[in-house]
Amino acid sequence: MKTLTITRPDDWHLHVRNGAVLKTVMPHTARQFARAIIMPNLKPPVTTVAQALIYREEILAAVPADLDFTPLMTLYLTGSTTTAEIKKAAECEHIHAFKLYPAGATTNSDSGVADIKAIYPLLAAMERHDLPLLIHGEVTDDACDIFDRERVFIDTYLSDITRNFPGLRIVVEHVTTTEAVQFVLASTPNIAATITPQHLLFNRNAILAGGIKPHYYCLPIIKRESHRLALVEAATSGNPKFFLGTDSAPHLTSLKENACGCAGCYSAHAALELYAEAFERADALNKLEAFASFYGADFYRLPRNSGTVTLEKTAWKVPAVYGKNDLSITPLKANEELPWKLQ
Ligand SMILES: [Zn+2]
Protein backbone atom coordinates (compact mmCIF):
# COMPACT_ATOMS: atom_id res chain seq x y z
CA MET A 1 0.00 0.00 0.00
CA LYS A 2 1.42 3.40 -1.02
CA THR A 3 -1.21 5.75 0.43
CA LEU A 4 -3.84 5.43 3.12
CA THR A 5 -6.79 7.83 3.32
CA ILE A 6 -8.92 7.84 6.47
CA THR A 7 -11.61 10.00 8.04
CA ARG A 8 -10.03 12.91 9.92
CA PRO A 9 -9.00 11.53 13.33
CA ASP A 10 -9.10 12.87 16.91
CA ASP A 11 -6.65 12.57 19.80
CA TRP A 12 -8.50 11.44 22.94
CA HIS A 13 -5.62 12.16 25.36
CA LEU A 14 -3.33 15.15 24.88
CA HIS A 15 -1.11 17.48 26.88
CA VAL A 16 -0.34 20.87 25.30
CA ARG A 17 0.87 22.83 28.40
CA ASN A 18 0.77 26.63 28.10
CA GLY A 19 2.97 29.62 27.19
CA ALA A 20 5.86 29.05 24.78
CA VAL A 21 5.53 25.26 24.77
CA LEU A 22 1.84 25.49 23.77
CA LYS A 23 2.82 27.70 20.82
CA THR A 24 5.41 25.13 19.66
CA VAL A 25 3.22 22.04 19.94
CA MET A 26 -0.27 23.21 19.02
CA PRO A 27 0.37 23.44 15.23
CA HIS A 28 1.54 19.80 15.22
CA THR A 29 -1.67 18.49 16.77
CA ALA A 30 -3.94 20.80 14.76
CA ARG A 31 -2.37 19.53 11.53
CA GLN A 32 -3.06 15.92 12.49
CA PHE A 33 -6.32 15.97 14.41
CA ALA A 34 -9.70 17.69 14.23
CA ARG A 35 -10.24 17.55 18.00
CA ALA A 36 -8.37 16.54 21.13
CA ILE A 37 -9.23 15.85 24.76
CA ILE A 38 -7.01 18.36 26.58
CA MET A 39 -5.49 17.24 29.86
CA PRO A 40 -5.91 19.67 32.77
CA ASN A 41 -2.62 19.10 34.65
CA LEU A 42 -1.24 22.61 34.35
CA LYS A 43 0.45 24.42 37.21
CA PRO A 44 -1.93 25.25 38.87
CA PRO A 45 -4.35 22.57 37.62
CA VAL A 46 -7.51 23.42 35.67
CA THR A 47 -10.15 22.62 38.29
CA THR A 48 -13.09 24.87 37.36
CA VAL A 49 -15.21 25.53 34.29
CA ALA A 50 -14.11 29.17 34.35
CA GLN A 51 -10.41 28.18 34.24
CA ALA A 52 -11.03 25.66 31.46
CA LEU A 53 -12.74 28.29 29.31
CA ILE A 54 -9.76 30.65 29.71
CA TYR A 55 -7.35 27.81 28.87
CA ARG A 56 -9.49 26.93 25.84
CA GLU A 57 -9.06 30.48 24.49
CA GLU A 58 -5.30 30.28 25.02
CA ILE A 59 -5.23 27.01 23.04
CA LEU A 60 -7.35 28.39 20.21
CA ALA A 61 -5.02 31.42 19.96
CA ALA A 62 -2.10 29.02 19.36
CA VAL A 63 -3.84 27.18 16.48
CA PRO A 64 -2.58 28.37 13.06
CA ALA A 65 -5.26 30.42 11.26
CA ASP A 66 -5.50 28.02 8.29
CA LEU A 67 -6.26 24.96 10.44
CA ASP A 68 -9.53 24.10 12.08
CA PHE A 69 -9.15 22.43 15.46
CA THR A 70 -11.48 22.06 18.44
CA PRO A 71 -10.08 21.56 21.95
CA LEU A 72 -12.30 19.38 24.14
CA MET A 73 -11.69 20.52 27.69
CA THR A 74 -11.49 18.46 30.88
CA LEU A 75 -11.36 19.38 34.55
CA TYR A 76 -8.90 18.12 37.13
CA LEU A 77 -10.64 16.22 39.90
CA THR A 78 -9.42 17.02 43.42
CA GLY A 79 -10.56 16.27 46.95
CA SER A 80 -12.17 19.71 47.00
CA THR A 81 -14.11 19.52 43.71
CA THR A 82 -17.78 20.26 44.46
CA THR A 83 -20.89 18.60 43.07
CA ALA A 84 -22.00 22.09 41.99
CA GLU A 85 -18.89 22.34 39.77
CA ILE A 86 -19.66 18.91 38.30
CA LYS A 87 -23.18 20.07 37.42
CA LYS A 88 -21.75 23.24 35.86
CA ALA A 89 -19.25 21.19 33.85
CA ALA A 90 -22.00 18.88 32.60
CA GLU A 91 -23.99 21.88 31.41
CA CYS A 92 -21.03 23.48 29.58
CA GLU A 93 -20.71 22.42 25.94
CA HIS A 94 -16.91 22.76 26.03
CA ILE A 95 -16.26 20.44 29.00
CA HIS A 96 -16.24 16.74 28.19
CA ALA A 97 -14.82 14.89 31.21
CA PHE A 98 -13.08 14.95 34.58
CA LYS A 99 -9.56 13.57 34.99
CA LEU A 100 -8.58 11.59 38.05
CA TYR A 101 -4.91 11.57 38.99
CA PRO A 102 -3.92 9.68 42.11
CA ALA A 103 -1.82 12.24 44.05
CA GLY A 104 1.81 12.09 42.93
CA ALA A 105 1.27 9.61 40.06
CA THR A 106 2.79 11.72 37.28
CA THR A 107 3.67 15.22 35.98
CA ASN A 108 1.87 17.96 37.95
CA SER A 109 -0.31 15.52 39.88
CA ASP A 110 0.48 16.92 43.35
CA SER A 111 -3.09 18.24 43.59
CA GLY A 112 -4.49 14.83 42.70
CA VAL A 113 -6.73 12.65 44.80
CA ALA A 114 -5.07 11.14 47.90
CA ASP A 115 -8.08 9.16 49.12
CA ILE A 116 -10.08 7.72 46.24
CA LYS A 117 -12.92 6.37 48.40
CA ALA A 118 -13.44 9.86 49.81
CA ILE A 119 -14.40 11.19 46.36
CA TYR A 120 -17.10 8.57 45.72
CA PRO A 121 -19.86 11.20 46.16
CA LEU A 122 -18.23 13.11 43.28
CA LEU A 123 -18.17 10.00 41.09
CA ALA A 124 -21.87 9.53 41.90
CA ALA A 125 -22.52 13.08 40.68
CA MET A 126 -20.57 12.43 37.46
CA GLU A 127 -22.56 9.25 36.92
CA ARG A 128 -25.80 11.19 37.47
CA HIS A 129 -24.77 13.92 35.00
CA ASP A 130 -23.35 11.38 32.55
CA LEU A 131 -19.94 13.05 32.49
CA PRO A 132 -17.06 10.65 31.70
CA LEU A 133 -14.27 9.98 34.19
CA LEU A 134 -10.75 9.67 32.76
CA ILE A 135 -8.37 7.77 34.99
CA HIS A 136 -4.59 7.70 35.29
CA GLY A 137 -4.60 4.17 36.67
CA GLU A 138 -1.51 3.76 38.81
CA VAL A 139 -1.00 3.43 42.54
CA THR A 140 1.60 5.77 43.99
CA ASP A 141 2.70 3.61 46.91
CA ASP A 142 6.51 3.71 47.22
CA ALA A 143 6.52 0.03 48.14
CA CYS A 144 4.87 -0.92 44.83
CA ASP A 145 7.25 -1.67 41.96
CA ILE A 146 6.89 0.89 39.18
CA PHE A 147 6.20 -1.85 36.63
CA ASP A 148 3.32 -3.20 38.78
CA ARG A 149 1.55 0.06 39.56
CA GLU A 150 -1.13 -0.18 36.87
CA ARG A 151 -2.03 -3.77 37.65
CA VAL A 152 -2.26 -3.04 41.39
CA PHE A 153 -4.42 0.04 40.74
CA ILE A 154 -6.92 -2.10 38.85
CA ASP A 155 -7.18 -4.60 41.71
CA THR A 156 -7.17 -2.00 44.48
CA TYR A 157 -9.39 0.76 43.04
CA LEU A 158 -10.70 0.33 39.54
CA SER A 159 -12.71 -2.85 40.09
CA ASP A 160 -14.41 -1.21 43.07
CA ILE A 161 -15.18 2.01 41.14
CA THR A 162 -16.78 0.15 38.23
CA ARG A 163 -18.81 -2.02 40.65
CA ASN A 164 -20.10 0.98 42.60
CA PHE A 165 -20.86 3.20 39.59
CA PRO A 166 -22.13 0.92 36.84
CA GLY A 167 -23.55 3.84 34.84
CA LEU A 168 -20.35 5.91 34.89
CA ARG A 169 -18.49 6.11 31.58
CA ILE A 170 -14.78 5.58 32.27
CA VAL A 171 -11.70 5.80 30.08
CA VAL A 172 -8.75 3.90 31.50
CA GLU A 173 -6.14 6.20 30.00
CA HIS A 174 -2.96 5.00 28.29
CA VAL A 175 -3.26 1.31 29.18
CA THR A 176 0.11 -0.43 29.28
CA THR A 177 -0.47 -3.99 30.50
CA THR A 178 -2.14 -7.26 29.59
CA GLU A 179 -4.11 -6.98 32.84
CA ALA A 180 -5.54 -3.57 31.89
CA VAL A 181 -6.56 -4.86 28.45
CA GLN A 182 -8.25 -7.87 30.05
CA PHE A 183 -10.01 -5.66 32.59
CA VAL A 184 -11.43 -3.40 29.88
CA LEU A 185 -12.47 -6.37 27.74
CA ALA A 186 -14.31 -7.96 30.67
CA SER A 187 -16.12 -4.73 31.62
CA THR A 188 -19.41 -3.27 30.41
CA PRO A 189 -19.44 -1.18 27.21
CA ASN A 190 -19.10 2.07 29.19
CA ILE A 191 -15.51 1.20 30.14
CA ALA A 192 -13.00 2.03 27.39
CA ALA A 193 -9.26 2.68 27.07
CA THR A 194 -6.82 4.83 25.13
CA ILE A 195 -3.51 3.48 23.84
CA THR A 196 -0.40 5.57 23.04
CA PRO A 197 1.93 5.10 20.06
CA GLN A 198 4.96 4.51 22.28
CA HIS A 199 3.29 1.64 24.12
CA LEU A 200 2.43 0.00 20.76
CA LEU A 201 5.91 0.46 19.27
CA PHE A 202 8.33 -0.13 22.12
CA ASN A 203 9.02 -2.34 25.09
CA ARG A 204 11.06 -1.35 28.15
CA ASN A 205 14.35 -2.16 26.46
CA ALA A 206 13.87 1.11 24.57
CA ILE A 207 14.35 2.98 27.86
CA LEU A 208 16.93 0.83 29.59
CA ALA A 209 19.03 -1.28 27.18
CA GLY A 210 22.27 0.14 25.79
CA GLY A 211 22.12 3.25 28.03
CA ILE A 212 19.33 5.26 29.64
CA LYS A 213 17.09 6.87 27.03
CA PRO A 214 15.08 9.56 28.80
CA HIS A 215 12.89 10.39 25.79
CA TYR A 216 11.22 6.97 26.10
CA TYR A 217 10.41 7.53 29.77
CA CYS A 218 6.73 8.17 30.36
CA LEU A 219 4.12 7.16 32.95
CA PRO A 220 2.75 4.58 33.10
CA ILE A 221 6.22 3.33 32.18
CA ILE A 222 6.63 1.20 29.03
CA LYS A 223 6.45 -2.49 29.99
CA ARG A 224 7.93 -5.79 28.78
CA GLU A 225 7.30 -7.25 25.31
CA SER A 226 4.38 -9.52 26.26
CA HIS A 227 2.40 -6.44 27.37
CA ARG A 228 3.23 -4.58 24.17
CA LEU A 229 1.88 -7.51 22.17
CA ALA A 230 -1.37 -7.47 24.19
CA LEU A 231 -1.77 -3.74 23.46
CA VAL A 232 -1.17 -4.22 19.74
CA GLU A 233 -3.75 -6.99 19.70
CA ALA A 234 -6.30 -4.77 21.49
CA ALA A 235 -5.67 -1.71 19.28
CA THR A 236 -5.92 -3.69 16.05
CA SER A 237 -8.81 -5.93 17.15
CA GLY A 238 -11.60 -3.68 15.87
CA ASN A 239 -13.09 -3.59 19.38
CA PRO A 240 -14.62 -0.10 19.93
CA LYS A 241 -13.46 -0.08 23.57
CA PHE A 242 -9.92 0.79 22.42
CA PHE A 243 -9.16 4.08 20.71
CA LEU A 244 -6.41 6.57 19.94
CA GLY A 245 -4.98 8.76 22.69
CA THR A 246 -1.39 9.84 22.16
CA ASP A 247 -0.68 11.14 25.67
CA SER A 248 1.77 13.38 23.80
CA ALA A 249 3.41 15.18 26.72
CA PRO A 250 5.97 17.84 25.82
CA HIS A 251 8.77 18.70 28.22
CA LEU A 252 11.77 20.91 27.51
CA THR A 253 14.74 18.83 26.39
CA SER A 254 16.73 20.14 29.36
CA LEU A 255 14.14 18.73 31.77
CA LYS A 256 14.14 15.30 30.06
CA GLU A 257 17.94 15.01 29.74
CA ASN A 258 18.37 15.61 33.42
CA ALA A 259 19.51 13.79 36.58
CA CYS A 260 15.79 13.59 37.46
CA GLY A 261 14.17 13.59 34.04
CA CYS A 262 10.45 14.35 33.59
CA ALA A 263 7.97 11.67 32.53
CA GLY A 264 6.36 12.06 29.10
CA CYS A 265 7.00 11.32 25.42
CA TYR A 266 6.40 14.02 22.83
CA SER A 267 4.63 12.44 19.84
CA ALA A 268 2.30 15.09 18.41
CA HIS A 269 4.75 15.90 15.57
CA ALA A 270 4.11 12.48 13.99
CA ALA A 271 1.27 10.87 15.91
CA LEU A 272 -0.60 9.32 12.99
CA GLU A 273 2.61 8.24 11.31
CA LEU A 274 3.68 6.41 14.47
CA TYR A 275 0.33 4.65 14.80
CA ALA A 276 0.43 3.73 11.09
CA GLU A 277 3.84 2.14 11.63
CA ALA A 278 2.53 0.08 14.54
CA PHE A 279 -0.61 -1.02 12.68
CA GLU A 280 1.34 -1.88 9.54
CA ARG A 281 3.75 -4.05 11.54
CA ALA A 282 0.70 -5.94 12.85
CA ASP A 283 -0.63 -6.21 9.28
CA ALA A 284 -3.73 -4.29 10.39
CA LEU A 285 -3.67 -0.95 8.53
CA ASN A 286 -7.33 -1.56 7.65
CA LYS A 287 -8.14 -1.21 11.38
CA LEU A 288 -6.46 2.18 11.82
CA GLU A 289 -9.37 4.36 10.70
CA ALA A 290 -11.91 3.10 13.24
CA PHE A 291 -9.31 3.21 16.07
CA ALA A 292 -8.24 6.75 15.15
CA SER A 293 -11.44 8.32 13.85
CA PHE A 294 -14.59 6.46 14.97
CA TYR A 295 -14.51 4.71 18.35
CA GLY A 296 -13.43 7.68 20.47
CA ALA A 297 -16.07 9.98 18.99
CA ASP A 298 -18.71 7.31 19.53
CA PHE A 299 -17.66 6.84 23.17
CA TYR A 300 -17.81 10.59 23.87
CA ARG A 301 -21.13 10.78 21.97
CA LEU A 302 -19.77 13.33 19.53
CA PRO A 303 -20.29 13.23 15.76
CA ARG A 304 -17.56 11.56 13.73
CA ASN A 305 -15.52 14.06 11.69
CA SER A 306 -16.15 14.78 8.06
CA GLY A 307 -13.18 15.21 5.76
CA THR A 308 -10.16 12.96 5.37
CA VAL A 309 -6.39 12.86 5.84
CA THR A 310 -3.96 10.89 3.71
CA LEU A 311 -0.81 9.10 4.80
CA GLU A 312 1.84 8.34 2.23
CA LYS A 313 4.45 5.58 2.34
CA THR A 314 7.39 8.03 2.10
CA ALA A 315 10.31 7.87 4.49
CA TRP A 316 11.20 11.12 6.25
CA LYS A 317 13.55 12.05 9.05
CA VAL A 318 12.22 13.43 12.33
CA PRO A 319 14.11 16.62 13.38
CA ALA A 320 16.42 16.51 16.43
CA VAL A 321 14.28 19.11 18.22
CA TYR A 322 11.32 21.41 17.78
CA GLY A 323 11.39 24.95 19.21
CA LYS A 324 14.41 27.13 19.78
CA ASN A 325 17.40 26.98 22.13
CA ASP A 326 16.43 26.60 25.79
CA LEU A 327 12.78 26.12 24.76
CA SER A 328 13.51 23.10 22.57
CA ILE A 329 11.51 19.87 22.80
CA THR A 330 12.96 16.52 21.70
CA PRO A 331 10.35 14.46 19.84
CA LEU A 332 9.87 10.71 19.93
CA LYS A 333 12.15 9.09 17.32
CA ALA A 334 14.27 12.26 17.00
CA ASN A 335 16.76 11.96 14.12
CA GLU A 336 15.18 8.66 13.03
CA GLU A 337 13.37 7.78 9.85
CA LEU A 338 9.61 7.15 9.83
CA PRO A 339 8.10 5.08 7.01
CA TRP A 340 4.78 7.00 6.79
CA LYS A 341 4.21 10.69 6.21
CA LEU A 342 1.03 12.72 6.60
CA GLN A 343 0.29 14.73 3.43
ZN1 LIG B 1 -1.37 11.95 30.10
Image (spheres, rainbow, N blue to C red):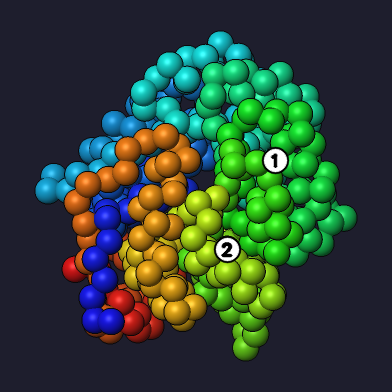
Disc 2 marks which amino acid?
Answer: Ala
Where is residue 164 shown, x and y percent of the image? 76, 29
Q: Residue at x 82, y 48 (%)?
A: 155
Vertical order, 173 against 221 (above or below):
above
**Badge 1: residue crowd in 10 Å (few <14, some 14–19, many ≥20):** many
- Mark 1 CB within 8 Å of ligand 1: no
Quickly name the residue at label 2: 234
Quickly name the residue at label 1: 102
Vertical order, 315 against 56 (above or below):
below
Disc 1 marks which amino acid?
Answer: Pro
Number of labels in the image equals: 2
Toward the viewer: 186 or 333? 186
Where is residue 58 shown, x and y percent of the image? 30, 35
**Badge 2: residue crowd in 10 Å (few <14, some 14–19, many ≥20):** many
- Extreme residue toward the left, this view: 66
Q: Residue at x 42, y 34 (%)?
A: 301
Residue 264 showing in the rendered view: no
